[in-house]
Amino acid sequence: MTGVRCFFSAALAILAVTASAQPRGEVSLLGEGDDKTMHYWEVTRQKWAAQPKWLPSAAGSPPLPIAKAVELADAWLRTRHADVKQFAITSITLRSQSSSGPGIVDGWFYRLEFQPVVAGRRLWGGQFVAVVLFDGTVVDPRSEPYGARRN
């Protein structure tokens, strides 16, 4: 009987701690970094829940055409890097977001990577990544020094 009481007491303690933990207000879409900095792309739960839904298995095109995602990402990069006159797209990825916590629905978004073009040549290196949601929103990343991730 004592063993059963201990088990239930431990289970109740775990449930109490879990219930008291406040879920983050953001849905984490992507985290990438370099030697010194991490970049986190996050949106509010409300923003994520309002996104157009899409399933690859439905055999239809994503709600936001790829060409429009590239156009939006390119314009966003130009505002952030006004000194660069031209970017070349190097990667377009459809990424899924799932299992980010209770009440978070699975969904998809674009991750686009670019290279700056200077004097007609692509330059390697740098962090030229854009995350575009299916409603056309380009997500601003939050950047932090490595190891400073908040909880």
Image (tube, rainbow, N blue to C red):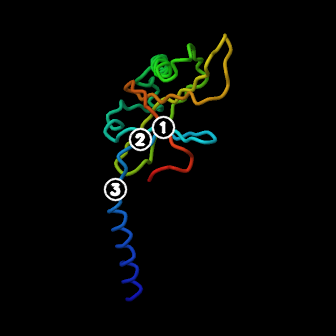
Label 2 or label 3, whichever lies nearer to me, is 3
Percent across and percent down for residue 125 are: 65, 28
Whole-number angstrom distance, CA of label 1 to CA of label 2: 7 Å
Q: Which mark is residue 106?
A: 2
Q: Please name the amino acid that badge 1 sits on.
A: Ser
Name of the residue lying farthest toward the front:
83
Residue at 47% x, 16% y: name it.
71
Sequence-first tag of 2 and 3:
3
Instruction: Give the side of residue 11 with respect to residue 71, left or right.
Output: left
* Mark 1 surroundings: few (<14), some (14-19) or many (≥20) residues within 10 A: few
Find residue 15 and report its image quarter. bottom left
Q: Which mark is residue 22?
A: 3
Percent across and percent down for residue 146 are: 57, 46
Instruction: Give the side of residue 17 with respect to residue 108, left or right.
Output: left
Sequence-first tag of 3 and 1:
3
Percent across and percent down for residue 143 are: 50, 39
Name of the residue lying farthest toward the bottom:
1
Q: Please name the amino acid that badge 3 sits on.
A: Gln
Label 3 or label 1, whichever lies nearer to me, is 3
